[in-house]
Amino acid sequence: MSIRIIFIAMLSTLCIACGDDDPAPANQPEILTARAECRLISVSGGSMVSYLDRVSIRAQDLDGIDDLGAGLAVYGTTVLPLSKEAVEGDPVSGCDDDDGQCVADYVWERNRDAAQVVCGEEGNAFDLEFTITDEAGFRAEAIIRTTVVE
């Protein structure tokens, strides 16, 4: 009899929080699309060399993009500075931003002042690492494989 009472007492204490709902999952940034393009460029002597020409990433954060960091694209020891722009368009389901801005594009484009990353004479593919972090410390990461475009 006493074992039965102890068992019932234990069960009742285990179910104190049974009716509570789980807290909402933390809102983390998400990478929707990512692309890194190499382009063949004519260099001195008429030979063609493939250079990294453009990196573009589309990211989403349902609590708004204002708290998203600048984003970081890295190849080896080369850090590529990306610009960030809000994407206007259709409302995003679940977007909790007052202005409705939950999607951003991150872009790096080759120019004369930018790092000149060589993809190789044959347009050899390589991987870029991309990381984005919001103010709460949540992050999204992607490995982006380069492709050669004409």
Image: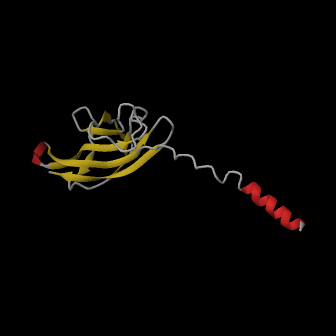
Q: Quadrant of the N terminus?
A: bottom right
Image point (36%, 45%), residue name: 93
Image point (25%, 31%), residue name: 113
Pick the residue in front: 109 or 9. Answer: 9
Task: Give the x, y percent position of residue 73.
Answer: 36, 42
Q: Is residue 21 left or right of residue 115?
A: right
Image point (27%, 41%), residue name: 90
Q: Is residue 23 left or right of residue 31?
A: right
Which quarter of the figure has residue 44? top left
- Residue 22's place in the image compared with 6, above or below, is above
Which quarter of the figure has residue 67? top left
Task: Give the x, y percent position of residue 118.
Answer: 26, 47
Task: Give the x, y percent position of residue 72.
Answer: 39, 40
Quick one: which residue is furthest to the right in this view? Answer: 2
**What colouring method underlies this structural image?**
secondary structure
Task: Give the x, y percent position of residue 45.
Answer: 11, 45
